[in-house]
Image (tube, coloured by chain):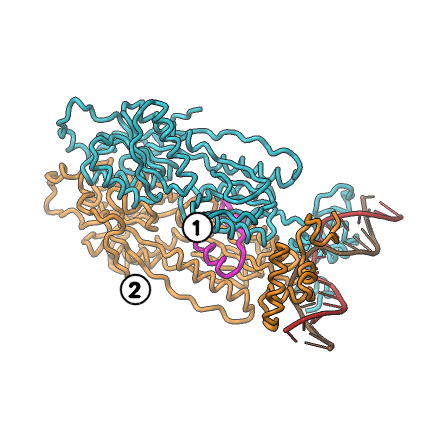
Chain colours: A cyan, B orange, C brown, D red
Amino acid sequence: MTRGTARSGNTAAPRSVDVARLAGVSQKTVSRVFNDEQYVSADVRRRVLEAAEELGYRRNNAARALASGRTRSIGVVTLGTALYGPTSLLMGVERVVRDTGYALHVVNTMEGDAAGVTGAVSSLLDQGVDGIVISEPIDEAGAERDASFRIDVPVLVLGAPLPVTAPRALIAGGGADLMARAAIEHLLDLGHLTVHHLAGPQRWYAAQDRLEGWRATLAAHGRTVPPVVEGDWSAASGYRAGRELAEHSDVTAVFAANDDMAIGLIRALTEAGRRVPEDVSVVGFDDIPVAAYVTPPLTTVRQPFDAVAQEGLKRLVHAIENPNADPLPTSDPPIDLIIRASTAPPPSRTTPARGRRTASRALKGAEHPSPPNGGKSTQR
Amino acid sequence: MTRGTARSGNTAAPRSVDVARLAGVSQKTVSRVFNDEQYVSADVRRRVLEAAEELGYRRNNAARALASGRTRSIGVVTLGTALYGPTSLLMGVERVVRDTGYALHVVNTMEGDAAGVTGAVSSLLDQGVDGIVISEPIDEAGAERDASFRIDVPVLVLGAPLPVTAPRALIAGGGADLMARAAIEHLLDLGHLTVHHLAGPQRWYAAQDRLEGWRATLAAHGRTVPPVVEGDWSAASGYRAGRELAEHSDVTAVFAANDDMAIGLIRALTEAGRRVPEDVSVVGFDDIPVAAYVTPPLTTVRQPFDAVAQEGLKRLVHAIENPNADPLPTSDPPIDLIIRASTAPPPSRTTPARGRRTASRALKGAEHPSPPNGGKSTQR
DNA sequence: CTGAAAGCGCTAACAG
DNA sequence: CTGTTAGCGCTTTCAG
């Protein structure tokens, strides 16, 4: 149990003094080598490295953090669901964080409301993270934000305004409204008079943005803005919405706030005898992996999760390491509308009687045999 | 910049001595209160808590870790994809970890092979985690494991044998073979003579397990074991496999190693004029959220991600906190085969001529209008 | 270029 | 029930 046994009884982890002794230098020099500080002769550096290797030395991070006041770690607050969007963002974040040499603490909050986020952030702060990423928080009307709760480390909020008080905040990943716009305009270009919207839960900023983009685009084109149907992101809710929408024969195009809902929607429509895309066009959002393979292949907006995560993190790390510098500028993410087979011109209203084509419906998909994405039109 | 300013110049974070001073107790007592140790009078506890509250005190984790030798954090190694399985496991893990009071470090490795896992684990060890969870590692043939790399903290490996040397290892989340068995037997019960398998990449243990379960079940029933088609988990690969399988008219049932591939497969089959389930039955694996809403709704095996994560973590935490005790026993996860509309009896071979039903195909799905899962048969 | 000394803020034994 | 005394293994001064 004693420590002094050096490298014979290898019970305890070796410390930098052990390395120093073996290399015949001072402990401080070992520290210098491991921190890549300059002013260490090549020879000494080599000897230290060799000694460390031999001992299997690894720095004690707790001690480092305690002495330096920095943990070199970033905390991420995510929502506790396996939803494709948040998940993809998390993966993107992890990728970048590692590249920057920071460690990642992840905390989930089932409810993305102010209270939930506050709790999650609090536990991150307890861990002593140097920066925080809040992914897709929710705007909980009822929960007044706790004014006394301040986050003093830099905070990156992905896709939403800030749900807490933080002087050093950065925002990234907006633009969902512009993406929605691309989807709506595609539909209008096809000849639809207006577009219905199957929205996500409006507590989510992500859902609000898409709705706003939809509404604004319709308004900009002078179209009537039909009532919104709200889902909860799930295919099940899309299905329920679909049963509703199927009853209104004036619905010829629907923009769903995510692909899962779009898929549920299509199923309900189909079951109700409304063909997609002949009778109703459907556009999704996200471009989940199966989107190209469902029936019919889904026209959708691809979200640039990786790009958003990458840029956001770069700005966060910059803010952490340069506390007094100006924040890095933001750049707009690309908009990627992927046109597949779930959208088509509206049924021609001059020929109300149709039915001939029903028999061939089963193989409709075969008309678009391209495996992955159909044509891509990247705008902006 | 000085510290001594106490609570007037609130530049630096308050420390436990500050709280102690305010509460009129010793620093150690503050420590006691925050660690929920016994032997603190209710009155003192209250005073300490109030002082802490007033100062906005929060424990310094680095100091705690340094002094105690424990970080109260668990590291998780995940694959760098947004695949539903690994993601769901991660969410499950996070949920449980937080409940146990530990923090979570997440490290992604793009390649789940030995080298990638080693690197990820290494960075976790650098962070000083008390335990490690390795989620779904990959069996990389080429990468010989580095014998000198030992993990001395407890390790929980989810769904696979261990890719590294670790004396204190725990395994959880097997049973995929039994789940595969349930799927295969369902198909055989329907009258299929044999079942083809669209496997996952065989570098993944998860894929190997499913394949093995498939093969064993077929063998146990004295059926011929057809050649395996291997995909890469993606719908695209399922689509490619489907084009292949569609050419063999003797294929009447396919067991896909995950739902994404099943969906791609169904699309390819449908495009080739092979109807699902009339001509070919398809079973997936995972029960992804859209599985109930694709066309046709997918019969699949639901994986108990939460249960697996929860039980595994419980055992891991036990191992961390009781270094010398025996590991907790494992329990088998439930098997949940969800029968929807993608499986049916094989086409009757006495009536080669069919076609009457084609016209109604478009609404085939309408015969199964139940929104979520169809019937569930939980076995074992 | 290198070293010595002094903590970082807390927990771990021990004493009361 | 409460306080004292030592460190944990580094980084940070400040001297060479």
- Closest to the observer, B144 or B24: B24
The residue shown at (51%, 50%) is A118
Image spot of residue A181 (x, y percent)? 38, 28
Image height check: is A145 above or below B27?
A: above
The kind of residue on which mark 2 rests is Arg
- State the mark number for residue A321: none
Image spot of residue B89 (x, y percent)? 43, 53
Disc 1 is attached to a residue of which chain? A
Magenta range is: B92-116
Mark 2, other Cα within 10 Å: few <14 / some 14–19 / many ≥20:
few
- Looking at the rendered image, the quarter that the C terminus of chain A falls into is top left
Image height check: is B62 above or below A334?
A: below
A34 on left or right of A225:
right
- Closest to the observer, B116 or B337: B337
Question: How many numbered discs, if any?
Answer: 2
Q: Mark 1: which secondary structure?
A: loop
The label nearer to you, 2 versus 1, is 1
- Closest to the observer, A196 or A114: A114
The kind of residue on which mark 1 rests is Glu
Mark 1, other Cα within 10 Å: few <14 / some 14–19 / many ≥20:
some
- State the mark number for residue B380: 2
- State the mark number for residue A111: 1
The residue shown at (37%, 36%) is A285
Disc 2 is attached to a residue of which chain? B
Q: Do the residues bearing badges 2 and 1 touch, measured as CB atoms within 8 Å?
A: no
User: Do discs 2 and 1 belong to a common subunit?
Assistant: no
Inspect the magenta stretch and tell me whether residue B98 lies in it: yes
Inspect the magenta stretch and tell me whether residue B352 lies in it: no
B214 on left or right of B26:
left
Image spot of residue A27 (x, y percent)? 76, 53
